[in-house]
Amino acid sequence: ETGVTQTPRHLVMGMTNKKSLKCEQHLGHNAMYWYKQSAKKPLELMFVYSLEERVENNSVPSRFSPECPNSSHLFLHLHTLQPEDSALYLCASSQDRFQANEQFFGPGTRLTVL
Amino acid sequence: AQTVTQSQPEMSVQEAETVTLSCTYDTSESDYYLFWYKQPPSRQMILVIRQEAYKQQNATENRFSVNFQKAAKSFSLKISDSQLGDAAMYFCAYRSAFSGGGADGLTFGKGTHLIIQP
């Protein structure tokens, strides 16, 4: 595997379910990001991790819970979501968070909340 | 907070022609970075071109070039000799040169859907 991978690619869940999105980067990067891409809206930054430490949380509701067990893996745990949370969730990584290096994106997980 | 505006939801161009996508941004910072990202229908976002605000010279990458007007806060992307593979959503993005306090991620525009007509 190369680059940034995300699983699953598609997810349908009810509002009472608990699910997790997984992201893995094979680039040796130290920073990882979660973005939300909704229709007709700009991509929104959700979380930033640097060396497994969360450094930014853009006022994201607590029903989204990130986890970064090591610099290669990033999870987004979901629980009691709302229909308006349906979106494409993109993971990205970069060499580090201190330089404006290129962010490499994964293919995304298309989430539908019923 | 910074904002990025892409005023063209959709653009269409004939194959082999040139097209320019517009982007404006608002910031009070003097040092920052600007990017154009491309998102083809398969949805994996890739970097097209990057510009550092302190550099006056416009960035170029093969058929892709930018017109960076710092005073006007404008950052347009020109695609020359358009090819069918250029069809995608194009996003303009801003990144502060500083870190922390909300600066680490990218601020994106809403995107422009580029259609290439054969």
Image (cartoon, coloured by chain):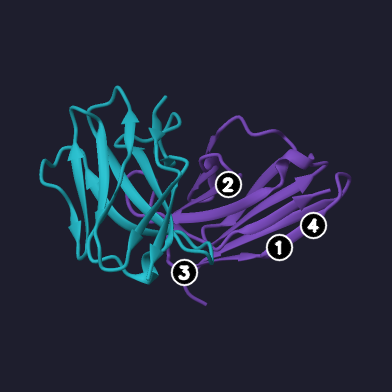
Chain colours: A purple, B cyan
The answer to whether marks 4 and 3 mark residues whose Cβ atoms lie closer than 8 Å is no
Measure the C-alpha gap from mark 4 to mark 2.
16 Å
The residue under label 2 is: A37
- Tell me the tag on residue A10: 1
Percent of width and height locating residue B66: 21, 49
Residue found at the very far top of the displayed protein: B28
Residues at marks 4 and 1 on the same chain: yes
Residue type for callout 3: Gly
Between the residue at mark 1 and the residue at mark 3, the CA separation in whole angstroms equals: 19 Å
Q: Is residue B22 above or below residue B47?
A: above
Q: Earlier in the sequence, mark 2 or mark 3?
A: 3
Residue A46, percent across and down? 57, 40
Q: CA distance from mark 4 to mark 1?
A: 7 Å
**Front of the two marks 2 and 3:** 2
Residue with the mark numbered 4: A12
Mark 4–mark 3 Cα distance, whole angstroms, equals 25 Å
Say which residue label 3 marks.
A3
Q: Give me the residue at 48% from left, 69% from top.
A: A26
